Image: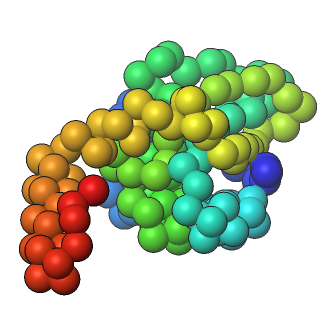
């Protein structure tokens, strides 16, 4: 699933702009991120509770320059925030969304988002990390205790 919008994104960390100009640009980019989430089919994939890989591609115009590796993710921050907000998933490191960034040359400036479901093998480290988190351990421990008490009360054997 993919969607493209004509937008020239810039590395926000290197821009020297007035706070009001920056706020207006950020608001526009967040809105476009939400638009991309709705028009890329990501909403349907999230309803299926699939872990997703979201790949952001910056399309560089004829006379543009490539960004360095630390500015590229920073340039997509507002788009990513808007995208995650529409999905209700958040953009935390351990969430259901994984992020990648790339650049390519094109005739005009633009941004493309490509969404794909993470394979079970690729998602396994994320799932394992979430399962071993302290919150998950407490939750699973509490569930196991409740199940043990329920089976004792019902006279059933524990598995």
Residue 66, given in percent of the width and then of the height, sits at: 62, 18
Q: Nearer the viewer, residue 116 or 135?
A: 135
In the image, 148: left or right of 40?
A: left
| Chosen colour scheme | rainbow
Q: Nearer the viewer, residue 116 or 36?
A: 116
In the image, 148: left or right of 102?
A: left
Residue 49, given in percent of the width and then of the height, sits at: 55, 62
Answer with the quarter of the image where residue 12 lies: top left
| As drawn, 119 above or below 5 | above
User: How many numbered marks are there?
Assistant: 0
Which residue sits at x=84%, y=37%? 108
In the image, 21: left or right of 128?
A: right
Q: Nearer the viewer, residue 25 or 103?
A: 103
Give the residue furthest to the right.
Answer: 107
Residue 89, given in percent of the width and then of the height, sits at: 44, 63
Check the picture and name the quadrant holding the C terminus: bottom left
Residue 31, given in percent of the width and then of the height, sits at: 57, 68
| As drawn, 107 above or below 158 | above
Residue 34 makes an appearance in the image: no
Give the residue furthest to the bottom.
Answer: 154
Residue 23 makes an appearance in the image: yes
| As drawn, 70 above or below 142 | above
Which residue sits at x=85%, y=29%? 106
Q: Nearer the viewer, residue 158 or 8?
A: 158
In the image, 109: left or right of 18?
A: right
């Amino acid at each position: 699933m993919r969607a493209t919008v004509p937008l020239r994104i810039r590395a926000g960390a290197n821009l020297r702009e007035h706070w009001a100009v920056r706020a207006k640009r950020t608001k526009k980019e967040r809105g476009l991120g939400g638009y991309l989430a709705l028009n890329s089919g990501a909403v349907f994939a999230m309803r299926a509770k699939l872990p997703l890989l979201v790949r952001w591609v910056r399309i560089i115009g004829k006379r543009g320059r490539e960004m360095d590796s630390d500015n590229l993710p920073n340039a997509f921050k507002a788009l990513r925030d808007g995208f995650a907000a529409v999905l209700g998933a958040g953009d935390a490191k351990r969430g259901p969304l994984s992020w990648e960034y790339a650049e390519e040359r094109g005739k005009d400036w633009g941004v493309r988002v490509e969404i794909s479901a993470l394979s079970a093998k690729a998602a396994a480290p994320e799932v394992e990390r979430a399962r071993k988190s302290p919150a998950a351990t407490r939750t699973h421990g509490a569930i196991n205790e409740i199940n043990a008490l329920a089976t004792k009360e019902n006279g059933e054997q524990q598995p």
